[in-house]
Amino acid sequence: MIKGSEKINFKLIYVLLITQLICLYVIKYINQNLSLSEFSLFNIGNLFNLLIYTGLVIGIFISTKKQSISFSQKWLIIYIIISWIILITAFISTKVKIISSSMYILNLPVDKIFAGLLFICYLFFVLHLLLFLWIGIIFKQKTTLVRNIINTILSLIVLLLIILVYEDNAVYSSGRWSISKSKNNIAVVLGAAVWSDNLPSPTLSSRVDKAIELLNEGFAGKIVLTGGSAPGEMSESEVALEYAKVKGVDTNKIITESSTASTAEQIEWIKINLSQNKNSVDDIILISDSYHLPRVIEISKFFNLDIKVAESSHKLNFKDKLINKIRECVALFNFWCFAL
């Protein structure tokens, strides 16, 4: 039997967990400068968050009923409070520049990498608790700390493998993504790396080539070039513009923006600046590489943005393709969980 004071403590635990889930949802939409009116429970990431916390609440409830499981309320409350601290710290790191944003690793700002690691640390704590509860319920034994840490790491690897399979099987060439010829369509080139001497990388030039192809074949009437710059470089959109000029594109049909630094920021810019003009725009066609498009689609869904997509012809060798796929898996996982 659970004593009265213990019941109160468990009510506190449930309140802490449910409030934390709501807080996580709020943080995700703040991270993308969206209001909660854009919230959709059917978003994959939001469903994933809900499943984890549902598993925690049910797991704690069942554990309290099983006398064979050693269960410490004090330890549980401390654990949840620590996860709260990490979550809030991670959110603060997205608003306060703890690390200079001028530092880059693998073409990513170090401050964003730091924030992402904090959010992953929070998720690790939550998954660690989830596995501890359910291993105890299913196998009726208390797992050791080291073994549960290993189990948590393995579960994260399994989740990434599932995302990898999802990306490989994402159907964006189906009828849903087919495009029709229209001068009111806008082809948007998502930014990519700029090489030394302000030359477009093969990734960027291939995306621009695809946009030019759509323009010349009547599938788009205008091209939008997106992307800001790293220190000491021209912006991605400026380099793409110079490349398009060399290809003979009429600059009156080109729009550039150089304020964005990530895919999510570019999609936010599109939502604000392009999707509002429904009367003058038929389809917005986002152009990127095949490995990148699944994340582009998922981010667009989060923004409730109706888009079409087109794949560039850029081909990678096996090593580069594998590296990019792994990077995209991690990036998509981060976006689903935290909207980063």
Image (spheres, rainbow, N blue to C red):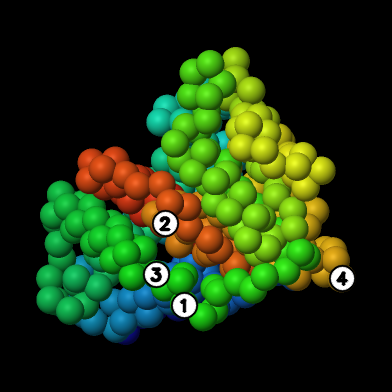
Pointers 1 and 2 in contact (C-beta within 8 Å): no
Measured Cα–Cα span from mark 1 to mark 3: 10 Å
Task: Please give the residue where the numbered disc 3 appears in the rendered image.
Answer: 170
Mark 3 crowdedness (10 Å alpha carbons): few <14, some 14-19, many ≥20 = some
Identified at 48% across, 58% down, the residue is 311
Where residue 107 sits in the image (x, y, percent)? 46, 31
SS assignment at label 3: loop
Task: Please give the residue where the numbered disc 1 appears in the rendered image.
Answer: 174
- For marks 2 and 3, the one nearer the N-term is 3
Pointers 2 and 3 in contact (C-beta within 8 Å): no
Pointers 4 and 3 in contact (C-beta within 8 Å): no
Task: Please give the residue where the numbered disc 4 appears in the rendered image.
Answer: 279
Identified at 14% across, 76% down, the residue is 140
Where residue 177 sits in the image (x, y, percent)? 54, 73
Mark 2 crowdedness (10 Å alpha carbons): few <14, some 14-19, many ≥20 = many
Mark 1 crowdedness (10 Å alpha carbons): few <14, some 14-19, many ≥20 = few
Residue 285 picture quarter: bottom right
Is residue 37 rendered to the left or right of residue 42? right
Task: Please give the residue where the numbered disc 2 appears in the rendered image.
Answer: 290
Where residue 135 sits in the image (x, y, percent)? 19, 71
Pick whichever, 309 or 272, lies toward us: 309
